[in-house]
Amino acid sequence: MITAAQLIAALDLKPLPLEGGYFCETYRSSLLSNGKSASTAIYYLLTPDTFSALHRLPTDEVFHFYLGDPVEMLQLGPSGGRTITLGTDVLGGQCPQAIVPAGVWQGSVLRPGGAFALLGTTMAPGFDFADYEAGERGQLTAAFPEFAEWIERLMR
């Protein structure tokens, strides 16, 4: 059975600053006229002691589930909030792919009892650390009180 440590070594994953988890950028396209890359792709690994802290980005992000245990994702946006389970049990309601629309707050955590989850994300235009906006606990809880427990769980 493959382990998180083996994946970290094999894929040369590093801790992801600000957000949490481990990542490796696998693709960055050429630059657009505005100086940003047209698209980017990464591997992203969650373990029991990591999570993706609530944040938002200015462009759509597509998550792809590759292997491991299910991941619970929270999305908070103009039309309210929802949770999505990323995983391979499609008939059980899990999604092998999920879209996070531009400007929507997002955070993810491995389902309790899980050992790891390897995902990928792609963005177009590409990711830039300068675009990362961390969530603020008080503001998000005030705007989405029904998700207060989730918000607390996904904050640093």
Image (cartoon, rainbow, N blue to C red):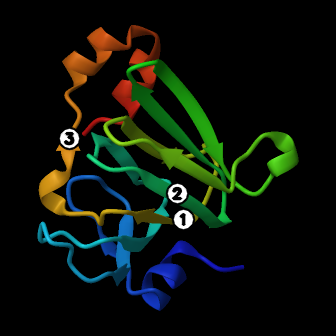
Residue 54 appears at what percent x and percent y?
A: 32, 38
Is 28 rendered above or below residue 69? below
Q: Which mark is residue 81?
A: none
Residue 38 appears at what percent x and percent y?
A: 30, 71
CA distance separating discs 1 and 3 = 21 Å
Residue type at numbered disc 1: Leu
Residue denoted by label 3: 134
Crowding at mark 3 (Cα within 10 Å: few <14, some 14-19, many 20+): some
Is 27 rendered above or below residue 156? below
Residue ID at (58%, 49%): 98
Q: Is residue 4 left or right of residue 41?
A: right
Query: In which quarter of the view is residue 139 placed?
Result: top left
Residue 51 appears at what percent x and percent y?
A: 40, 49
Residue denoted by label 1: 119
Number of callouts:
3
| Residue at disc 3, secondary structure | strand
Is 156 rendered above or below residue 142? below
Residue 10 appears at what percent x and percent y?
A: 49, 90
| Upstream in sequence: badge 3 or badge 2 | 2
Residue denoted by label 2: 63
Query: In which quarter of the view is residue 106 placed?
Result: top left
| Upstream in sequence: badge 2 or badge 1 | 2
Q: Is residue 75 left or right of residue 21?
A: right
Q: Comparing marks 2 and 1, which lies closer to the viewer?
A: 2
Residue ID at (39%, 16%): 148
